Image (spheres, rainbow, N blue to C red):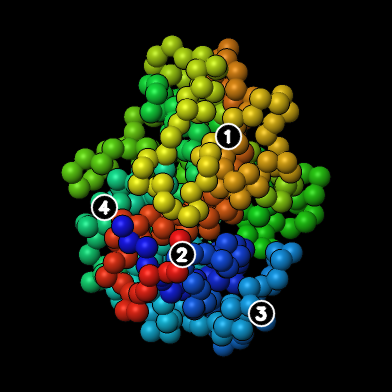
């Protein structure tokens, strides 16, 4: 098992997700942020001036004075990069890094459905990492992605059910937080006291990404899961936390109690055991009749634990429940950091460091 110390770069470091990376990596035992990159608008400035820092906590001192670079491989002094780039530019820039031999751990949508790119949640489909061997960007370079923020939360609830039962169909209504639209995001006059029943591209992602993530590695490719999904996505005036109201149908006879039991009993695969960002529990099942709520439960497990409540028999499908996940932590930066930890632990970053050292303690 590799437990080296790595120098990391953040592409799109000034944005909402980029800032979350910097916040979550501040005291990371394996990864140190040594380079930050953003657009021409930010390049050349100290990070503290380029970023409109959104968190109440101060910018970590080690990053505050770093000079923002252009998103070019030669400009960044690091072993691998996290990407929180705007999807309008992520495709080309991430490819450039992979071709230059730099591993890219991305949040952006551009390569999620690429046949040879893992769409990864370590507790769900760690075996999909094998797809990396099919990638041919450049010696040592590869791309790994994490799912869309809504998809991530929903999958954390569905995967334990698929391990136990024969899941057939999912109907879900998403109530999605404003932070999912980045900063400044949705105009305040549209957001306050309102619900917007449209988030561009989101319903398509929820219809396609889960079938890949829950699919089976078959030789060199993923055989998609035989699962039918229908999603409706709304933007609600909540800061953080996507709430999913889901109703599920099984091919076998399954009750609400059995679903709650399967969620409680789920154990993440052993390969994730030593990963510093792995939450425990993976999913918490709440019995209170008014749980989960974004205000009260979104920070469970540092934002990495998904909360499920209102698990009941459903008179239309079989079982219904409400699920809450942190969209910029579990659904974005935290999920990508966990992906990089799995890559490090499984030796995929072994060739990378020129000056890797064993950390004092992990
Ligand atoms: P954001 O706040 O708009 O940030 C975008 C970042 O991309 C900024 O750092 C920006 O730099 C940089 N950028 C824009 N154009 C660039 C260029 N030409 N070259 C280099 N850098 C450029 O967006 P976000 O909400 O953080 O989202 C970032 C990515 O994560 C998106 O692909 C998004 O779809 C995905 N994502 C977001 C969430 C969420 O909950 N927000 C969840 C999952 C995935 P400047 O500051 O210099 O403009």
Label 3: which residue?
48
The residue beneath circle 4 is: 131
Q: Residue at x 69, y 31 (%)?
A: 291
Identify the residue at horizontal 32%, vertical 79% (top origin). Answer: 354
Considering the numbered disc 3 on the image, is that residue within a helix, a strand or a loop?
Answer: helix
Question: Counting residues from the N terminus, which is met first, the one under dot 3 or under dot 4?
Answer: 3
First in sequence, mark 4 or 1: give its number: 4
- Which residue shows up at 42% across the image and 82% down it? 77
Q: Secondary structure at mark 1?
A: strand
Q: Are marks 3 and 1 in contact (CB under 8 Å)?
A: no
Inter-mark Cα distance, 4 to 1: 31 Å
Give the quarter of the image for residue 15.
bottom right
- In primary-sequence order, the first of circles 2 and 1 is 1
Residue 316's place in the image compared with 111, above or below, is above
* In the foreground, 2 or 143: 2
CB at mark 4 closer than 8 A to ligand 1?
no
Q: Which residue is mark 2?
A: 361
Residue at image point 38% right, 84% down: 74
Q: Nearer the viewer, residue 29 or 123?
A: 29
Q: CA distance from mark 4 to mark 2?
A: 31 Å
x then y, percent, for residue 132: 27, 57
Dot 4, how many residues are within 10 Å of its Cα: few (below 14), some (14-19), or many (20+)? Answer: many
Which mark is nearer the camera, 3 or 2?
2
Tell me where residue 295 appears, x and y as whole percent. 74, 43
Which mark is in front, 2 or 1?
2
Q: Which residue is mark 1?
A: 284
């Amino acid at each position: 098992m590799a437990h080296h110390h790595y120098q990391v770069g953040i592409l799109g470091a000034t944005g909402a997700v980029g800032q979350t990376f910097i916040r979550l990596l501040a005291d990371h035992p394996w990864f140190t942020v040594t380079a930050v990159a953003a657009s021409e608008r930010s390049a050349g400035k100290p990070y503290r001036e380029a970023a409109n820092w959104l968190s109440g906590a101060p910018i970590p001192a080690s990053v505050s004075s770093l000079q923002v670079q252009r998103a070019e491989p030669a400009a960044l002094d690091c072993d691998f990069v996290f990407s929180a780039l705007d999807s309008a530019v992520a495709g080309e820039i991430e490819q450039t890094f992979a071709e230059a031999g730099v591993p890219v751990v991305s949040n952006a949508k551009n390569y999620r459905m690429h046949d040879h790119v893992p769409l990864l949640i370590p507790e769900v489909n760690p075996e999909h990492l094998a797809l990396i061997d099919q990638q041919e960007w450049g010696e040592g370079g590869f791309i790994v992605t994490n799912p869309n923020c809504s998809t991530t939360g929903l999958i954390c609830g569905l995967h334990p059910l698929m391990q136990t039962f024969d899941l057939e169909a999912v109907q879900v209504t998403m109530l999605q937080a404003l932070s999912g639209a980045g900063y400044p995001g949705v105009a305040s006059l549209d957001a306050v006291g309102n619900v917007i029943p449209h988030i561009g591209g989101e319903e398509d992602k929820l219809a396609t990404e889960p079938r890949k993530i829950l699919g089976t590695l078959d030789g060199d490719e993923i055989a998609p899961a035989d699962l039918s999904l229908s999603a409706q996505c709304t933007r609600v005036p909540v800061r953080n936390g996507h709430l999913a109201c889901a109703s599920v149908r099984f091919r076998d006879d399954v009750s609400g109690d059995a679903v709650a039991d399967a969620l409680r009993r789920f154990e993440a695969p052993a390969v994730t055991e030593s990963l510093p960002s792995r939450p425990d529990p993976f999913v918490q099942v709440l019995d209170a009749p008014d749980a989960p709520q974004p205000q009260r439960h979104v920070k469970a497990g540092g934002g990495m634990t998904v909360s499920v409540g209102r698990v009941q028999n459903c008179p239309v499908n079989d079982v219904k429940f409400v699920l809450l996940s942190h969209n910029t932590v579990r659904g974005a930066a935290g999920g990508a950091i966990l992906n990089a930890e799995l890559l490090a632990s499984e030796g995929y970053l072994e060739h990378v460091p020129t000056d890797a050292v064993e950390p004092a303690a992990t």
